[in-house]
Structures are given as structure tokens and as C-alpha cells.
Image (tube, rainbow, N blue to C red):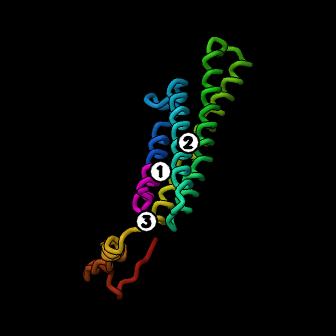
Amino acid sequence: MNNTPISDALALRATASTFDAQRGKLPVPGDVHRSPDSVAVARQISELGALISGLGDEVLFRVVDHDQEAHSARVITSFAAAVGPAGEAASALGAVVHQLSFLNQTEHLRDQPDARDAREAAARVTVDALGTADTALREAADSLHAASATVSPPSARLQAARSRSTTAAPAFASPPPTVPGAAAPADRIARGR
């Protein structure tokens, strides 16, 4: 099995990128190009289901290996921990589809006061659910990126290059020299009216 720290770090990074890509696909209420659409959200739920299945495969692949490397426990834990946020995001998107379906079914009632209140509540639930999905996907991606760095930290060469980088230098320079003629003479007294 190819279960080296580098291959596992790459697998963690690739999965983190998949979570980032799912975040990028989330609908944005009010955005003409990314407004919530039941079909697109349902497809994304399916994609998250496949992602959860892939996470399970990553865990299984490593758990059945009898000759686990020292870093394997961290990798297994990281992939397994990402299942929760993926499920949370899928659940939140399920709520979005539910609310969008309600909005579609009640479109013809939108001018009635009771229906208007219910439709406004459905829109708020949709926005909240999309926020929950976004947060869950971001946390999973961040966690997998962090795990990748601990499994296979940057090489000594890269760390040395970072220490020599200009970003490591102080962020501010010495103040510019003052122009001698710009200051008011000391013997002058300023008076106001």
C-alpha cells in the first residue's frame, strides 16, 4: 500500500479542496447567477453523499492496513471527523430544498397575508440553512488542511526559504527624514483670534 506521509497529506489536501469546491457551489440568495435552485441543491446533496462515501473509503483503506505507519492514526481520525460536517452540510441543504419546494408550491398564494408570512419565514430558514452548510464545509476543509500540514510538514528547505522571505522582515520602515524648512520657527508664537 502507498501509505506514506506525503501520499496521505496529498489525499487530505485533495479532500479539503473538494470541500472548498462544494462551498463554492453553494447558492447565494439574491445573486442572479447563484440563486437557490432545487435541482442544483439536490445535485449538491448527491455530491456530498458521494463525498461522505469517499471519506468512508479513505478510513476503511487505512484501518484494514495491518502495517500502519505512525501518522496513520491522525489521517484516519481526520477523514473520519470530516464525515460529520459533510453530513451536517447535506442535512442543511436538505432543509434548503424543503423550503424551496414550499416556496414553489405556494407561489400562487404570495399575495395572501398568511402565505406571505410563511413564505418570508421559509426564505429566512433557507438563508440560515445555507449559512450552516457553508460553515460546516469550511470547518471540514480547514481541519483537513491542518491535518495535512501535521502529517507531512513543510520540508526543511521550504521552512528555511520562508525564514529568509521578505515577509519575515519588519513591516514598517524608518520614518522619512523631515524637511528642515517645513517646521515653524521656535521663536514664533501662534495666536488665535
Of residue 14 and residue 37, the one placed in the foreground of this image is 14
Q: Earlier in the sequence, mark 3 or mark 1?
A: 1
Distance of label 3 from label 1 (alpha carbons): 15 Å
Mark 3 vs 2: CB contact within 8 A: no
Q: Which residue, as the protein is rendered here, is positioned at the far top?
A: 108
Residue 17 to residue 72: above or below: above
User: CA gap, disc 3 to disc 2?
Assistant: 24 Å
Query: Which residue does the image show at 58% across and 37% down from the upper left?
Result: 130
* Type of amino acid at the residue the image marks with label 2: Ile
Question: Spatial distance from mark 2 to mark 1, Cα to Cα?
Answer: 13 Å
Place of residue 162 in the rendered image (x, y in percent of width and height, measured from the top left):
34, 72
Q: Which residue is mark 2?
A: 52
Judge from the rendering whether residue 35 lies leftward or rightward of residue 131; answer left or right.
left
Q: Residues within 10 Å of mark 2 (few under 14, many from 20)?
A: many
Badge 1 is on which residue?
A: 16
Numbered badge on residue 152: 3
Q: Is residue 40 above or below residue 92?
A: above
Residue 76 location, x and y as percent? 55, 56
Snapshot quadrant of residue 158: bottom left
